[in-house]
Amino acid sequence: MAVEDTATLRRIFGNTGFLVAGRATNAVCSFLYMAWAVRALGLSQFGVLMLVTTFGSAISAATHLQSWQPLLHYGTEPFQKGDLSRFNRLLFFCMRADLLSGAVGSLVGMLGVWLFGTSMGWPQADQAAAMFYMLTISFMNTGWSTGVFRLCNAFWLSSACDLSGVAVRMVGTGLGLWLHLGLDYFLLVWSMTQLAMFITNSVMGWWLLRNDGKVGTFRLFHPIRITDAPGIWRFTLSTSGNHVLGTVFNQFGTLLVGGLLGPTDAAVYRVSRQIGDGIAKPAQLMMPALYPEFIRLREKHDWYGLKHVTLRLFMLIGGFSLVLMAFALVAGNTFLTWMLQVHWPGGSLMIMLMLGNAIMGLGIVPLEPLLTVVGKVSHVLIGRIVVTITYLPLVYVMASKWHLAGAAAASVVASLMMLLICMRPVIVWFSKVAPGHRPREVTDH
C-alpha cells in the first residue's frame, strides 16, 4: 500500500508538472503583455481594463456551473468500466451546463455594467465597450473539456490549450503598443484570448474522446437519467456555489477597491495580487491533479492511503511556502515596479501581504478536493459563506482606513479563516475512518 501511495504522489506531481509548465509560460508572458498594456494605455486606463476584465471573470465564475467536477465524480466509474452510454449522457449534461451558464453569465454581466459600471470605477465613456466585452462570458466556460483531460490523465493538453490564449494576447498587446491603440482594442484582445482557448479546449476534448472510442454521435440534448448520477444537481450546485463564493473573495475585492480608491489603486492591487498568486501558482496548480487521484483512493476505500497522501502534501506545501516568502522578500517589489512602470511606495508590503494571502490558500489545496470527494463539500460551502460575509465588510472598513495595505491585510485574515474552517472537518473525519497509523494487516496487504 505504501508503494501505491508513492505512485499516487508521483502521478499528482507529474500532472502538476504539466500544469506548472503551461502556467509558468503564461506567467512569464503575462509580465510582458501586462507591461505592454500599461505602456500603451497609461496606468489609469490600464486600471479600467483590469476592472472591466475582472468584472467579466467574476461574473463568469459566479454563474459558471463547475461541470468538470460532476463529470469526474460520477463519470469516472462508467468511463473506466466501459459503460459508454451512461458516460455519454453525463458528458452531454456537462456540455449543456457550460453553455447554459455561459449564456446566463453574459446577460448578468451586461445588466451589471448597465446598473453598476460607473460606481465600480470606470468612466461613462467606456460603458459601451464594457457592455460588449460581457459577451465574452458566453465562451469562458470549458468545464466539460477540462473534465475530459483529467479523466484521460491528459493534463498536458489543458496546458497546451491555454497557450493558444497566451499567443493571442501576446500578439494582440504587442500590436496595440506598436500601433498606439486604445482601450476598446485591448478589450477586444482580451475577448479573443478567451475565444481561442474555448475553441482549442473544445476541439481537443472531443478529439481525445473520439480517438479513444469513448463517444459516438454528437448529441447535445441527449437526456440524462436519474439512475445515471443520483444527486448530480445537488452536487453540481454545491461545488459551483463554493466556487462562486471563492470568486467573490478573489475578484470582487478588486472591484471594491476600485470603487473605493479608484482605478489606479485598483490596478496596483490587481497586479500585486497577480504577482503573489503567480509566485504561489505552482503549488496551487496541484489541486486539479488531486481530484482524480483522491477519487481512485476513495473507490478503493483506502482511507489510510488518503490520509498519508494528504499529510505528505501538507508538509511539502509548508516547506514550499517558506521558499516563496524568501523569494518575494528579495524580488517581489522589483516585479511590481517593472509591471507598473512606476515605483509604488509600500510595494514590498503589498507583495508580502498578497503572497501571505496566496500561502493561506495553499493550505486549502489538499483540503477542498478531499472534502468534495468524500461527500462533505457542504463544509467547504458553509466555510465560504462565513468567510465571504466576513470579508466584504472587512475589506471595506480596512481599505477605507488603511487604503491598499488594509485591503491586502483583509484578504490574509479571510484566507486564514477559510483554512481553519476547512481543517476542522478533515481532522474529525480522519479520526473516525483512519485513526492513528495504518494497521499492520492493512500495511502488509
Image (spheres, grey):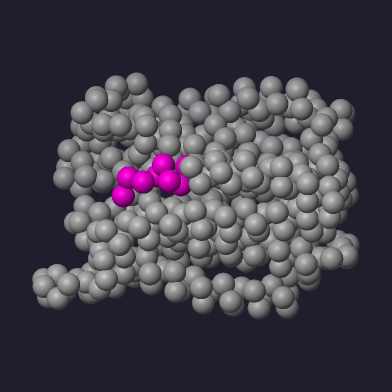
Front position in the image: 289 or 349: 349
Quadrant holding the C terminus:
bottom left
Q: Residue at x 34, y 67 (%)?
A: 309
* Rendered location of residue 374, percent (x, y): 31, 49
Q: Is residue 81 visible?
A: yes
In this rendering, position of residue 177 left or right of residue 26? right
Q: Residue at x 38, y 57 (%)?
A: 426
Q: Residue at x 27, y 41 (%)?
A: 75
Task: Indicate whether residue 73 is drawn in magenta.
Answer: no
Q: Is residue 362 above or below residue 74?
A: below
Marker count (numbered): 0
**Prevalent SS, magenta region:** helix
In this rendering, position of residue 232 left or right of residue 332? left
Q: Is residue 403 above or below residue 362?
A: above
* Rendered location of residue 196, percent (x, y): 57, 41
* Rendered location of residue 37, percent (x, y): 79, 51
In this rendering, position of residue 97 left or right of residue 194? left
Q: Is residue 151 above or below residue 275?
A: above
Determine the image quadrant of residue 431.
bottom left
Task: Indicate whether residue 380 is drawn in magenta.
Answer: yes
Q: Residue at x 70, y 26 (%)?
A: 112
Q: Which residues are magenta?
A: 374-381
Front position in the image: 89 or 185: 89
Q: Is residue 151 visible?
A: no
In this rendering, position of residue 379 left or right of residue 300? right
* Rendered location of residue 174, percent (x, y): 76, 52
Q: Is residue 111 above or below residue 143?
A: above
Quadrant holding the N terminus:
bottom left
